[in-house]
Image: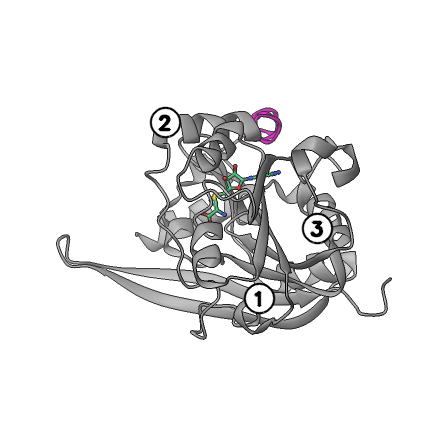
Amino acid sequence: MDPDLYRSAQTQSGVSPFWAQKYSNDASKNWEKFYKRNSTNFFKDRHWTSTESTDGFPCLAEHKDDRTVVVEAGCGVANCAFPLLDTNPNIFVHAFDFAPTAIELIKSNGRYDEDRMNAFVWDFCTQPLSEVDRETRGSLESGEVDFCLLVFVLSAVPPAKHASGLRNLYNLLKPGGKVLFRDYATGDLAQNRFSCKNRIDENYYVRQDRTLSFFFSEEELRSCMAEIGFEEIYVRRVQRIIENRKEKLKMNRVFLQAEFGKPRTDQ
Ligand SMILES: C[S@@+](CC[C@H](N)C(=O)[O-])C[C@H]1O[C@@H](n2cnc3c(N)ncnc32)[C@H](O)[C@@H]1O
């Protein structure tokens, strides 16, 4: 990209406060439209979550309790949850998303096993768990969760709602429980491709389909998590050059991978 255009896209906002508020208010409606349009055809299964690789969270496979309780926040159509259940027999997953169609697609999938999974609708940024109907949320209780997967979700949440969402996840965890985080980082190719027309604020954009896209710096993530009371285990920047041989393109993807714990002393 032309360096002048790039600089202008990073500093000018093309979205008025009125529209920024509207995109934020309509976030669940816009994701609902996304799943009606794309069904299960957009995201691919993520097989790496419990692996030893630098992309994985090996603590998921190492946790040897008879029943490990995992929450997948903003699960979409369960591209993390299904592979995780295939390889880890002791895991039970509570998977939630605020797009009802995504949850319907999970429940009508042949891989859905009620004995090992509960999928339900929840907007975790605007509602505490106690306000979600018991019948829907099944056996999920605050303070009983070992791990919370937060994979490419917080970037879809307006920054003003990050703290309320993270607080609700904090309350779900047991003392010593962990948030396992992966999301887009500043400098990612997708950020560089946004024009200033789509920029709402620093590192914050709206896509053509009206879904939101925030890019995290290490400092931003650390301060957000510390504000809630999480303890940092690690935060690292993961860089991947992805080659599209057909188009002869090299794509520089940048993610943040992180784990944060709820202090053991917080009962
Ligand atoms: C980029 S998709 C990622 C889906 C899934 N985590 C994955 O890795 O394939 C972001 C997801 O977050 C969900 N989401 C965004 N904000 C949410 C909120 N406040 N409450 C629940 N789900 C939310 C969207 O509906 C969407 O399914």
Secondary structure type for disc 3: helix
Question: Mark 3, mark 1: which one is toward the viewer?
Answer: 3
Query: How much space separates mark 3 and mark 1, taking CA atoms?
Result: 15 Å
Percent coordinates x, y for residue 49 in the rendering: 47, 62
Do the CB atoms of the residues marked 3 and 2 lie less than 8 Å apart?
A: no
Q: Amino acid at mark 1?
A: Ala
> Image point 46% across, 61% down: which residue?
255
- Asked if residue 123 lies in the magenta stretch, the reply is no
| Image-quadrant location for residue 157 | top right
Q: Is residue 10 left or right of residue 223?
A: left
- Which residue carries the number 1 mark? 258
Q: Which mark is residue 37?
A: 2
- Which residue carries the number 3 mark? 169
Q: Amino acid at mark 2?
A: Arg
Q: Which residues are magenta?
A: 16-27
Label the magenta part by its dominant secondary structure. Answer: helix
